Image (spheres, rainbow, N blue to C red):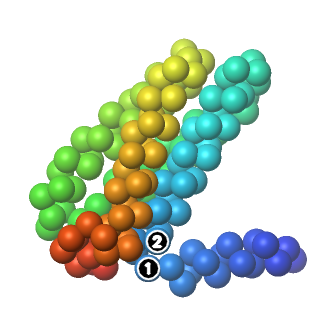
């Protein structure tokens, strides 16, 4: 199958990214798909809402799988991720954009934190990022 230059670039970006960058990419994807699901709910395109909410859930499951439980923060993150999964399921079942908007807010907050950690501006947490 022939890939477009953009697809080749995306694949290369993922394959060469460090742990922190991969986490950031996952957050950005989850935010994008959740927002697409919200827009689809508003436009009453429920099949598209379902598809996008499921994609966001899959990404959050990847975030859970990426946790390193040698760090105590992982126990807190898994609870947050599980809560977001619950909210996405409820938003999808009820076709309720408000519930999904809460997930976007949490993802945006966590993305900001990961960007700080990844850039080394959040203290000595760089070792935790590098171990992912």
| Residue 51 screen position, x and y as percent | 66, 37
| Residue 42 screen position, x and y as percent | 70, 20
Q: Which residue has dot 2 on it?
A: 21
Above-or-below relation of 25 to 108: below
Quarter of the image for residue 105 reads top left
Viewer-closest of 115 and 7 = 115
User: In which quadrant will I find the C terminus?
Assistant: bottom left
Quarter of the image for residue 31 reads top right
Quarter of the image for residue 44 reads top right
User: In which quadrant will I find the N terminus?
Assistant: bottom right
2 and 1 marks in contact (CB < 8 Å): yes
- Asked whether, in this view, residue 5 is left or right of residue 104, the answer is right
Above-or-below relation of 70 to 29: below
| Residue 75 screen position, x and y as percent | 17, 51
Instruction: Label 1, secondary structure: give it.
Output: loop
Above-or-below relation of 123 to 26: below
> For residue 102, which numbered disc appears in the image?
none
Instruction: Label 2, secondary structure: give it.
Output: helix
Cα–Cα span, label 2 and label 1? 5 Å
**x 44%, y 79%: residue:** 18
- Asked whether, in this view, residue 47 is left or right of residue 65, the answer is right
Disc 1: CA contacts within 10 A as few (<14), some (14-19) or many (>=20): some
Residue 9 in view of the camera: yes
Viewer-closest of 71 and 125 = 125
**x 43%, y 45%: residue:** 107
**x 45%, y 46%: residue:** 108
Residue 93 in view of the camera: no
Above-or-below relation of 27 to 53: below
Q: Which residue has dot 1 on it?
A: 18
Disc 2: CA contacts within 10 A as few (<14), some (14-19) or many (>=20): some
| Residue 12 screen position, x and y as percent | 64, 81
**x 49%, y 38%: residue:** 104
């Amino acid at each position: 199958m022939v890939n477009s230059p953009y697809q080749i670039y995306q694949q290369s970006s993922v394959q060469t990214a460090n742990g922190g960058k991969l986490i950031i990419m996952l957050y950005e994807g989850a935010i994008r798909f959740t927002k697409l699901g919200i827009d689809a709910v508003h436009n009453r395109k429920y099949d598209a809402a379902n598809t996008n909410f499921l994609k966001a859930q899959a990404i959050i499951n990847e975030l859970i799988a990426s946790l390193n439980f040698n760090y105590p923060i992982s126990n807190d993150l898994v609870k947050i991720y599980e809560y977001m999964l619950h909210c996405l399921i409820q938003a999808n079942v009820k076709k309720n954009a408000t519930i999904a908007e809460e997930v976007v807010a949490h993802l945006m907050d966590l993305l900001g934190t990961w960007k700080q950690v990844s850039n080394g501006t959040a203290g000595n947490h760089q070792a935790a990022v590098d171990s992912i």
